Amino acid sequence: MRPVTLLSVALAGLLCAVAPAGAVPPADGSQGQPAAAAVPPPQTAPAARPQAPGARAPEQRRRRTSYASCNRESHRRKLSGGARRRFLVRCRLGYERRPAAPSAPARRP
């Protein structure tokens, strides 16, 4: 790369690293005041609740099923050839519904 390009990229990276994430120039035109004197805006978003250690965050997605589990299911269904290949692809993508495991009956003491 050219030295001018490298310097401009390095300067941009340095400015991004130094500036706070939500930094916005003040609207009242007080450019001469230090940034520490500026009053932070009130938070309008509700504070995030701490979640239990075992709970998943809502934005996390479920893990994709493994090839091995799809392969076991294809053998359980006794699929072969093209039907098995199609099943494996659809299973890996999450399109195939796997039958729910029957729940064990409750024990009586």
Image (spheres, rainbow, N blue to C red):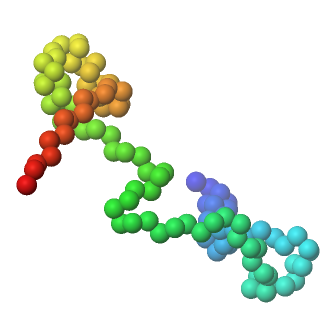
Q: Is residue 72 left or right of residue 16?
A: left
Vertical position of residue 86 compared to residue 47: above or below: above
Kindly indicate the quadrant of the structure image that contains residue 105.
top left
Kindly indicate the quadrant of the structure image that contains residue 83.
top left
Which residue extends farthest front? 109
| Residue 104: image location, x then y, percent | 14, 41
Q: Residue at x 28, y 18 (%)?
A: 86
| Residue 38: image location, x then y, percent | 79, 82
| Residue 4: image location, x then y, percent | 67, 60
Along the viewing direction, whichever of 67 and 109 lies nearer the viewer? 109
Which residue extends farthest top? 82
Kindly indicate the quadrant of the structure image that contains residue 48.
bottom right
Residue 89: tell me if it is visible.
Answer: yes
Which residue extends farthest right? 29
| Residue 30: image location, x then y, percent | 89, 79
Vertical position of residue 80 compared to residue 21: above or below: above
Q: Is residue 21 left or right of residue 78?
A: right
Q: Quadrant of the N terminus?
A: bottom right
Along the viewing direction, whichever of 2 and 51 lies nearer the viewer? 51
Vertical position of residue 73 compared to residue 27: above or below: above
Q: Residue at x 23, y 13 (%)?
A: 82
Along the viewing direction, whichever of 29 and 64 lies nearer the viewer? 64
Q: Quadrant of the C terminus?
A: bottom left
Q: Residue at x 44, y 65 (%)?
A: 51
Which residue extends farthest left? 109
Residue 11: tell me if it is visible.
Answer: no
